[in-house]
Amino acid sequence: MILGLSIHSFTVLHVVISLIGIVTGLVVLYGMLGAQRMSGWTAVFLAATVLTSVTGFLFPRAGFTPAQGVGIVSLVVLAAALLALYAFRLAGAWRWIYVISATLALYLNVFVGIVQAFQKVPFLQRLAPTQSEPPFIIAQTVVLAIFAVLGYLAVILRPADLRAPLPGVRG
């Protein structure tokens, strides 16, 4: 049992939170590319992605795992995004720090999703049983390239909307 839930129920909850983080993160990234401030979506994305990492640490494991390493990196990246957005209100360099850290946090969530898909989905598992085969490497490389390009574009677009103070925050 984890937090009063069976391991199966807790896993379902963790996956649902992860999917909420991914979907809302994609909406937020789209907004960054289109100069749209999406405060509500952003709050849900950041909260869900933090919860995804935190709940990941609650699964029973023997020893340190790569998943825990990704979780630590994700939480550090999310801390930078939260500081940039809510403490420093995207002023100056904090804007690109936010864009990069938010994009990286989303990428890490998707990266883990791909790993899990290749471990759990029978069709994908047959294509890459050890996750060192070309289909897995190609999938991860393509996703990394997509996020690198989108993150770069979000940084260089520098829309005025994203530099403005957050609604309801005195600046």
Image (spheres, rainbow, N blue to C red):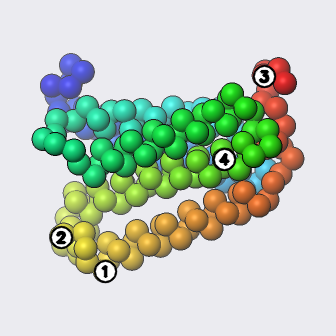
Tag in front: 3 or 2 = 3
- Extreme bottom residue here? 134
Instruction: Compute the Cα span from label 1 to label 2.
Output: 11 Å
For residue 106, side relative to residue 88 (left or right): left
Front one among 13 and 144? 144
The numbered mark, 1 or 4, whose residue comes first in the sequence reads 4
Tag in front: 4 or 3 = 4
Mark 2 burial class by Cα count in 10 Å: few <14, some 14-19, many 20+: some
Residue type beneath disc 4: Ile
Mark 1 burial class by Cα count in 10 Å: few <14, some 14-19, many 20+: few
Residue 127 vs 70, above or below: the answer is below
Residue type beneath disc 1: Pro
Residue type beneath disc 2: Pro
The numbered mark, 4 or 2, whose residue comes first in the sequence reads 4
Give the residue drawn at x 84%, y 37%. Answer: 164
In what quadrant of the picture does the N terminus appear? Answer: top left
**SS assignment at label 4:** helix
Q: What residue sits right under mark 2 in the picture? A: 129
Tag in front: 4 or 2 = 4
> CB of mark 4 within 8 Å of CB of mark 2?
no
The numbered mark, 3 or 2, whose residue comes first in the sequence reads 2
Residue type beneath disc 3: Val
Q: What residue sits right under mark 3 in the picture? A: 169
Q: What residue sits right under mark 1 in the picture? A: 134
The label shown at residue 97 is 4
The numbered mark, 3 or 1, whose residue comes first in the sequence reads 1
For residue 163, side relative to residue 43 (left or right): right
In what quadrant of the picture does the C terminus appear? Answer: top right
Q: Position of residue 131 (x, y in %)?
A: 24, 69
The numbered mark, 4 or 3, whose residue comes first in the sequence reads 4
Give the residue drawn at x 37%, y 33%. Answer: 54
Residue 7 vs 152, above or below: the answer is above
